[in-house]
Image (tube, coloured by chain):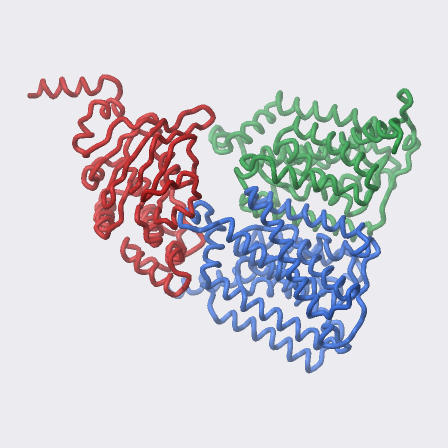
């Protein structure tokens, strides 16, 4: 059982960032925090399926990109405001999740096969978006700059960070609800043992479907917000493997299947990545090398991520005190 | 519509490209068949081999076919070391752990190459790159004809190793029954590493065959990963003949679909095959170790 | 309550269960015994919905459930344990049992308190916080039982819950099983330990090489020559009878 305490720490951390932002942060730090929050959202989406359900997806770009493109197209081609785009983006992202889930789970795919098929689905979408005129083809899409709350774009980017923080906090609550609900218990049960879960009356297919739909929706939300910040997407950004990988890395490094793991992971990874880049100068890709090394180290030495590492330490210390 | 000659040429080109694909898939399927792991770093290791071939040519002026003879044992050693000292210990033997460690490795390798060589595409200019072999009215590129021949020879050698040598027997024993093999004194960690090394060595040969007619950039291998997985899944995970036939088939599909759909949309054919095979082949083939 | 009729299961030409029928009376403890490899666990898997039979029917409380998925059967009140225990290894005992309890309540607090009560009932009350992976074999068997019980079954299928336990552990579990029946749960159990079968069961079915060779009151079944031969080999019944006659 996850203590309430660390949940409160996570909220406090978000509040601190928010306050710092309002008080005033250098532009590059502000941008880093914005990016951390976007990745934290995407990673929390991944975590709902991959962490709690044990279904590691390598293709969450499929949902991120769908959210991003839906928002961009509705806003640019149809003149809807950003909130409509956001709701539709999340809805379409969820639908894509449900379709992929329906096909994969009906065929009984899990483990490596589920990872690979999600990657393939994301790639199919990438190729399609790269050649379809509605998505701007290989040239990509520019989203018009329209400042204002209804457009989720602000001349003062601090407001945007505050909105992101609110969304991240909301997903923390969502995940906490999940962890305490019957649905969450069923999801974890099927991760631990599929057969036993069925014997206890768990409709495994249905639970997986609900999980992937929810997971896709949250990651699509990250895509919708990404567009408002960067105002440009193309197929390689929206459906590229980078976002699948960062969402997965952040969740696993932070602690998959925990409430605060994805937030920890994205802050630590992107923070370290930024530090590496500033030390290594302009060497391309060096931050991703660091991500890869951290992932391998985590799998080797901290299978439950940073969060698990510290809670294990705490357990050990507690045990030692018991013994003493 | 295209004339029959163009279509037949596309088919044959696909077949020859498919032979090199088959070689890449051969390594992957061997590793899967024995270690029961999905090696996500396979594509990145192919890129490494291709860069080695390029370096040998660029710095030392070595012909790619010549340098492959040196790079193959080198890749064997790299593969052995990776499995024995990194993938094996770090993953604690769990499927998910292996998947993540090899994913992590692929990201590390790909971005180290990016840091070292930047994202430019590199090619090799040989005298024979554009030589053609005329067969009747058809003109076939020499590098691809060589690719087909060498791939077939490599597959036969690999089969002989597995069938005739002691280590080959040990590999087959471990593939069938890991526990039993270790009980009769086979060093499973060593056999795993040798298998992984053999699979990686196949990549060196594939790299040597690809470079004269292809290019390399840090992400080249990533493009091959899904192709190779498609072949392996199509041919049946762990099956060597399956990888050969699957490779040839996928090469043809790619050549034909890019002829009709254009290069960018042409890739979609492979992904769709991959998805369809995974979805509609009986799950028992895949679910066993899931 | 449960009627399985002429169930047949083939695995690639191997006939695992051959037209076997079983009839479980409401309120009874019914045993399913037989030598190793007789097809008992296959029979269970077909009754619980984990395998679909090649032919034959399964009816539960008069409804044909032959093609129904396992989770739907669980909702009807048909729960099972696994011979090879299948705990949710990463969860603690209480959360393991709560998964069963969620079948009838969506309220986490209620499910958890129900789980605690159920744990108490099977003697796991002091290990609620322990991870399932940290339990002994006896503990895991109890956990299997508790999880199944938490679904509030009408019929409980027990697949060798006593196997691997030492005599004193068996002595502890027997009254638990009897008390479960006394509370109105019908039980069908696969068991190897004959003492337990004789002690608990109202009637017994004997499966041998996929066929149901005998059924009835335990004592009568044990003296059935066909049963003795199935366990001890051809001619054994004759030998035992003649030895018995010689002794007398």
Image x and y of residue B198, in percent: 67, 32
Residue A70, image quadrant: bottom right
How many marks the image carries: the answer is 0
Image x and y of residue A244, in percent: 67, 54
Position of the N terminus of chain A, as image quadrant, is bottom left
The answer to whether residue B23 is above or below residue C139 is above
Residue A248, image quadrant: bottom right
C193 horizontally vs A180: left or right: left
Residue A155, image quadrant: bottom right
Image x and y of residue B11, in percent: 81, 29
The tint chain C carries is red
Q: Nearer the viewer, residue C170 or C70?
A: C70
The tint chain B carries is green
Q: Nearer the viewer, residue B180 or C21?
A: C21
The answer to whether residue C17 is above or below residue A179 is above
Q: Residue at x 39, y 50 (%)?
A: C75
Position of the C terminus of chain A, as image quadrant, is bottom left
Q: Which chain is blue?
A: A
A153 horizontally vs A168: left or right: right
Image x and y of residue A110, in percent: 56, 45
Q: Nearer the viewer, residue B13 or B22?
A: B13
A61 horizontally vs C137: left or right: right
């Amino acid at each position: 059982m996850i203590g309430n305490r660390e949940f409160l720490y996570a909220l406090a951390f978000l509040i601190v960032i928010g306050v710092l932002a309002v008080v005033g942060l250098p532009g590059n730090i502000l941008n880093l925090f914005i990016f951390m929050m976007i990745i934290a959202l995407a990673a929390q989406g991944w975590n709902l399926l991959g962490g709690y359900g044990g279904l590691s997806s390598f293709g969450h770009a499929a949902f991120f990109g769908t959210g991003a493109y839906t928002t961009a197209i509705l806003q640019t081609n149809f003149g809807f405001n950003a909130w409509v785009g956001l709701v539709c983006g999340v809805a379409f992202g969820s639908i894509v999740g449900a379709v992929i889930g329906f096909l994969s789970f009906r065929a009984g795919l899990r483990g490596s096969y589920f990872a690979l098929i999600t990657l393939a689905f994301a790639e199919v979408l990438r190729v399609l978006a790269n050649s379809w005129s509605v998505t701007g083809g290989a040239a990509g899409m520019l989203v018009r700059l329209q400042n204002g709350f209804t457009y989720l774009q602000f001349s003062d980017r601090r407001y945007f960070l505050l909105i992101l923080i609110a969304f991240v906090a909301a997903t923390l609550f969502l995940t906490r609800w999940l962890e305490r609900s019957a649905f969450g218990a069923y999801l974890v049960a099927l991760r631990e043992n599929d057969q036993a879960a069925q014997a206890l009356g768990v409709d495994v297919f249905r639970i997986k479907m609900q999980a992937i739909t929810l997971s896709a929706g949250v990651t699509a939300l990250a895509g919708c917000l990404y567009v408002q910040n960067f105002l440009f997407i193309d197929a390689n950004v929206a459906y590229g493997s980078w976002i699948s990988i960062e969402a997965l890395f952040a969740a696993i490094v932070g602690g998959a299947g925990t409430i605060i793991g994805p937030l920890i992971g994205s802050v630590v990874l992107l923070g370290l990545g930024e530090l590496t880049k500033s030390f290594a100068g302009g060497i391309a890709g060096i931050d991703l090398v660091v991500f890869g090394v951290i992932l391998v180290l985590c799998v080797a030495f901290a299978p439950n991520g940073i969060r698990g590492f510290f809670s294990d330490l705490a357990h050990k210390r507690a045990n030692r005190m018991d013994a003493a | 519509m295209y004339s029959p000659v163009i279509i037949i040429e596309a088919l044959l080109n696909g077949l020859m490209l498919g032979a090199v694909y088959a070689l890449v898939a051969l390594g992957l399927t061997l590793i899967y068949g024995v270690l029961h792991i999905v090696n996500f770093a396979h594509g990145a290791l192919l890129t490494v081999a291709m860069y080695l071939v390029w370096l040998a040519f660029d710095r030392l002026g070595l012909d790619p076919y010549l340098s492959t003879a040196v790079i193959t044992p080198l890749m064997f050693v790299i593969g052995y070391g990776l499995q024995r000292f990194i993938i094996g210990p770090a993953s604690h033997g769990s499927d998910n752990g292996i998947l993540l460690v090899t994913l992590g490795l692929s990201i590390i390798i790909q971005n180290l190459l990016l840091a070292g060589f930047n994202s430019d595409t590199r090619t090799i200019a040989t005298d024979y790159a554009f030589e053609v072999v005329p067969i009747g009215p058809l003109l076939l590129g020499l590098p691809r004809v060589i690719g087909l021949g060498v791939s077939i020879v490599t597959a036969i050698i690999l089969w002989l190793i597995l069938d005739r040598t002691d280590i080959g027997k040990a590999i087959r024993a471990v593939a069938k029954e890991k526990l039993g093999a270790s009980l009769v004194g086979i060093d499973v960690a060593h056999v795993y590493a040798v298998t992984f090394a053999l699979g990686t060595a196949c990549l060196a040969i594939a790299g040597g065959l690809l470079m004269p007619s292809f290019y390399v950039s840090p992400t080249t291998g990533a493009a091959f990963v899904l192709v190779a997985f498609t072949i392996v899944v199509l041919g049946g995970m762990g099956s060597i003949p399956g990888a050969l036939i699957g490779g040839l088939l996928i090469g043809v599909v790619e050549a034909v679909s890019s002829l009709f759909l254009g290069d960018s949309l042409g890739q979609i054919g492979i992904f769709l095959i991959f998805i369809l095979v995974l979805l509609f082949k009986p799950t028992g083939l895949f679910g066993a170790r899931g | 309550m449960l009627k399985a009729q002429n169930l047949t299961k083939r695995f690639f030409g191997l006939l695992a269960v051959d037209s076997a029928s079983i009839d479980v009376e409401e309120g009874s403890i019914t045993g399913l015994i037989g030598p190793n490899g007789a097809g008992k666990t296959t029979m269970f898997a077909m009754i619980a919905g984990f395998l679909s039979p090649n032919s034959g029917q399964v009816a539960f409380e008069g409804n044909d459930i032959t093609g129904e998925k396992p989770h739907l059967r669980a909702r009807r009140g048909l729960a099972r344990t696994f011979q090879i225990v299948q705990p949710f290894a990463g969860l603690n005992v209480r959360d393991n049992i709560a998964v069963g309890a969620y079948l009838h309540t969506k309220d986490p607090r209620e499910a958890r308190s129900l789980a605690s009560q159920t744990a108490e009932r099977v003697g796991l009350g002091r290990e609620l916080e322990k991870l399932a992976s940290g339990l002994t074999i006896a503990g895991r068997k109890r956990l299997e039982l508790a999880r199944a019980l938490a679904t509030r079954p009408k019929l409980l299928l027990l697949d060798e819950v006593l196997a691997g336990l030492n005599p004193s552990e068996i002595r502890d579990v027997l009254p638990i099983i009897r008390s479960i029946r006394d509370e109105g749960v019908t039980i069908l159990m696969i068991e190897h330990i004959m003492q337990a079968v004789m002690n608990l069961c109202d009637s017994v079915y004997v499966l041998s090489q996929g066929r149901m060779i005998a059924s009835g009151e335990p004592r009568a079944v044990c003296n059935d020559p066909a049963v003795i031969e199935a366990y001890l080999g051809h001619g054994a019944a004759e030998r035992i009878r003649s030895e018995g006659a010689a002794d007398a």
